[in-house]
Image: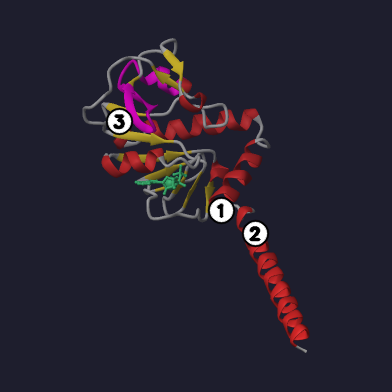
């Protein structure tokens, strides 16, 4: 009788422990397989759309965006403008920068030790490839004076002037410290009804695409 009782208790204990360990392993496995965030889903969708737009349409949209920018008082009155030297998948800025660098002080971001700082653009030839394959000025000196305007790249923007970047938060951290007029630019399909935001996301002052302006 006593032996049977011991045996019963042991079997019961064995099954309970087994059940707990199965549940635990299921839970940890599910935690490892994290759901992609809302932000990363949008980044992925925009990447797909970029592949579908024809080169001629891209060029047309680039011209229209910069025509609008050239007509803005914020641009006309600005002496120092921070831009971005576009990557192949971004709205192209190269011609615009080369053209305007003769008349205004154009600045470009440089990522150093995980912080974004700003250096003057002198010429295309002077740029060297830095973090993430982005071309950056190689001049020694950081630009520390007043910046009048920033033209900001983005993966997506929305009608509330929110911006979704590549997911590193460099511009959010930069704009938290440096209060400058910010114009987000992109292809028209990059302007969505809404992009997901978190507390640290900094809003733009204006969004310009070829066919729409949000201000
Ligand atoms: P992006 O703006 O490039 O789309 P996210 O907004 O997703 O990227 O931000 C990327 C990471 O950087 C997030 O973990 C975010 O919390 C962090 N981050 C952004 N801004 C700040 C800030 N001002 N201070 C601390 N962390 C920040
Ligand atoms: Mg952000």
Q: Which mark is residue 30?
A: 2
Q: Residue furthest left?
A: 145
Residue name at image x 68 percent, y 37 percent: 52
Can residue 155 be spotted in the picture? yes
Is residue 150 shown left or right of residue 33? left
Single out the residue that lies furthest toward the bottom: 1
Q: Quadrant of residue 46?
A: top right
* Part of the protein shown in magenta: 95-119
Which one is earlier in the sequence, the residue at label 2 or at label 3?
2
Mark 3 = which residue? Answer: 76
Please tell me whether mark 3 sits on a helix, a strand or a loop. helix
Q: Name the residue at 76% across, 83% down.
A: 3
**Which residue position holds label 1?**
37
Q: Nearer the viewer, mark 1 or mark 2?
A: 2
131 vs 188, nearest the viewer: 131
Q: Position of residue 148 (x, y in %)?
A: 26, 33
The percent coordinates of residue 154 (x first, y second) are 48, 40
Looking at the rendered image, the quarter that the N terminus falls into is bottom right
């Amino acid at each position: 009788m006593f032996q049977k009782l011991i045996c019963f208790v042991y079997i019961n204990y064995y099954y309970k422990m087994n059940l707990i360990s199965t549940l635990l392993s299921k839970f940890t496995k599910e935690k490892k397989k994290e759901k992609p965030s809302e932000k990363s889903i949008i980044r992925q969708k925009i990447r797909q759309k970029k592949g579908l737009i024809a080169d001629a349409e891209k060029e047309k949209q680039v011209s229209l965006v910069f025509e609008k920018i050239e007509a803005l008082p914020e641009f006309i009155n600005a002496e120092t403008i921070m831009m971005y030297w576009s990557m192949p998948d971004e709205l192209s800025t190269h011609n615009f920068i080369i053209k305007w660098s003769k008349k205004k002080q154009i600045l470009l971001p440089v990522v150093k030790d995980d912080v974004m700082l700003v250096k003057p653009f002198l010429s295309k030839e002077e740029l060297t490839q830095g973090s993430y394959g982005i071309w950056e000025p190689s001049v020694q000196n950081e630009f520390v004076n007043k910046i009048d305007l920033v033209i900001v790249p983005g993966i997506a923007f929305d009608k509330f002037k929110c911006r979704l970047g590549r997911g590193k938060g460099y511009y959010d951290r930069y704009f938290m410290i440096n209060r400058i007029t910010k114009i987000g630019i992109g292809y028209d399909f990059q302007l969505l009804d809404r992009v997901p935001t978190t507390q640290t996301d900094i809003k733009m002052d204006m969004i310009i695409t070829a066919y729409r302006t949000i201000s």
